Image (cartoon, rainbow, N blue to C red):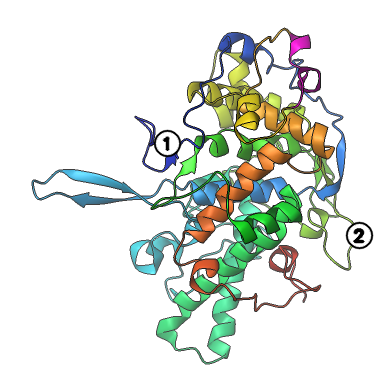
């Protein structure tokens, strides 16, 4: 891969560093992202047939996990301080921070092997721990940005604490309990990414090929970095999977992600998430479906609340589509067609992309190309050959290069927690039996 970008942290670089940036008028590009524009799916977006509604939120959780901003400081002999950015890992640093000694505020005072949980207005440990102003006290504040992120974080906190109890019951020495629990939670999470999340997102055949033959493009020499084509292109696919509204539980009614489920505030018991409504769980009716990946976003993402975006004079910056397009343009990402050709794939055609009818005469921004490729090649159910390979190779590469991951440390490891079906899945973390 190419050298890291000047001005970017040492955690990012290019996957296709020899490709030229997409050319085109950024102002015209952003005009397509406003309400009523090309990317506005309105309030009646089409549902996917196979993909459950919760998967894009797990994708956001993973994105936060591998791009956590935490870094270490070191000093030279002359006193100059250096910032050492941590290698991207799928290791739940958002839960654990620097551990009970480094970040004691994340842990229980009387039982520091366990993570803190918050109680909701019904007295149940079903919320994040919060300060007096209702702001979450967690390892990554981005995981309080909306209700689904907060509730996923709560589920992982609960899993850790349950494992602490389980290990103690098995007689594990107290000095070893925390580290064992952390390893088991991280490994079950990594297993789910490899064997549940990625096959759902890109197809099991592609995952099996990469696991067997290795990556074609994301070849890591030394510590892994995150390609910008992944971070600001392909891995933003989930924005097109967000529904217009969601039913959280039997009594919630239909609610929009924004503004109804905006985070940074306590979560009442009436808005606790019933996970079988978001992921297919054996023994339960099918979950709500995600929106199709088709290049359009639900209206609530085209008109983001100011609490998310801040004040802006440009209407496009209130749109998640506009922000995605602007990031790709600012980093000089190549077009989707250029990336497809570099990968040996036949690009989808201009009529299939559909930008020409909106007055855009250049090639396609990578982010939008990945969405349209999904719609054209996979009926909007999963990523196509370009987006799917970028995402799968990078995530598998990050896990494989982590010396503490199960695939590096103990490749034959299998999940030890109970599973509802033949294999362990995310449902067994979020909606365990009993």
The spot of residue 236 in percent (x, y) is 63, 37
Which residue is disc 2 drawn over? 285
Rendered residue at 47%/81% (across/down): 177
When asked about the image quadrant of residue 155, the answer is bottom right
Q: Residues within 10 Å of mark 2 (few under 14, many from 20)?
A: few
Q: Residues within 10 Å of mark 1 (few under 14, many from 20)?
A: few
Q: Is residue 351 magenta?
A: yes
Measured Cα–Cα span from mark 1 to mark 2: 48 Å
The spot of residue 237 in percent (x, y) is 68, 37
Query: Which residues fall within the magenta stretch?
Result: 348-358
Under circle 1, the secondary element is loop
Which residue is disc 1 drawn over? 2
Rendered-image quadrant of the C terminus:
bottom right
When asked about the image quadrant of residue 41, the answer is top right
Frontmost residue, 242 versus 395: 395
The spot of residue 230 in percent (x, y) is 56, 39
Of the numbered discs 1 and 2, the one sitting upstream in the chain is 1
Rendered residue at 82%/32% (across/down): 376
């Amino acid at each position: 891969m190419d050298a890291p970008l000047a001005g970017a942290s040492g955690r990012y670089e290019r996957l296709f560093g020899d490709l030229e940036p997409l050319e085109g008028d950024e102002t015209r590009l952003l005009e397509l992202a406003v309400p009523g524009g090309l990317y506005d799916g309105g309030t009646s977006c089409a549902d996917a047939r196979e993909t459950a509604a919760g998967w894009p939120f797990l994708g956001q959780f993973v994105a936060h996990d591998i791009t956590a901003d935490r870094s270490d400081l070191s000093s030279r002999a002359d006193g100059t301080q250096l910032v050492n950015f941590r290698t991207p890992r799928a290791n739940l640093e958002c839960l654990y921070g620097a551990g009970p000694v480094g970040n004691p505020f994340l842990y229980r005072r009387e039982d520091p092997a366990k993570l803190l949980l918050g109680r909701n207005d019904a007295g149940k440990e079903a919320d994040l721990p919060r300060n007096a102003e209702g702001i979450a006290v967690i390892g990554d504040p981005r995981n309080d940005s909306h209700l689904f992120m907060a509730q996923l974080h709560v589920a992982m906190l609960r899993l850790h604490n349950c494992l602490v109890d389980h290990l103690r019951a098995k007689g594990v020495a107290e000095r070893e309990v925390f580290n064992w629990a952390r390893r088991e939670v991280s490994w079950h999470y990594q297993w789910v990414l490899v064997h549940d999340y990625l096959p759902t997102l890109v197809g099991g055949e592609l995952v099996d090929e990469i696991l067997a033959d290795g990556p074609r493009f994301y070849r890591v020499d030394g510590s892994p970095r995150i390609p910008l084509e992944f971070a600001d292109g392909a891995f933003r696919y989930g924005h097109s999977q967000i529904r217009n509204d969601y039913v959280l539980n039997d009594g919630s009614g239909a609610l929009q992600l924004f503004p109804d489920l905006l985070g940074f505030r306590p979560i009442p018991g009436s808005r606790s998430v019933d996970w079988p409504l978001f992921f297919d769980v054996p023994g339960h009716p099918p979950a709500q479906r995600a929106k199709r990946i088709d290049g359009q976003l639900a209206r609530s993402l085209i008109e983001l609340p100011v609490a998310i975006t801040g004040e802006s004079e440009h209407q496009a910056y209130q749109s998640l589509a506009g922000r995605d397009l602007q990031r790709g343009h600012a980093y000089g990402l190549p077009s989707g067609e250029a990336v497809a050709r570099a990968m040996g794939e036949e690009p989808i055609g201009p009529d299939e992309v559909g930008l020409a009818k909106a007055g855009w005469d250049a090639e396609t921004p990578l982010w939008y190309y990945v969405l349209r490729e999904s719609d054209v090649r996979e009926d909007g159910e999963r990523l196509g050959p370009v987006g799917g390979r970028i995402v799968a190779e990078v995530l598998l590469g990050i896990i494989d290069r982590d010396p503490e991951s199960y695939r590096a440390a103990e490749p034959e490891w299998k999940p030890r927690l109970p599973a509802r079906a033949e294999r362990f899945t995310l449902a067994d973390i979020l909606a365990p039996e009993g």
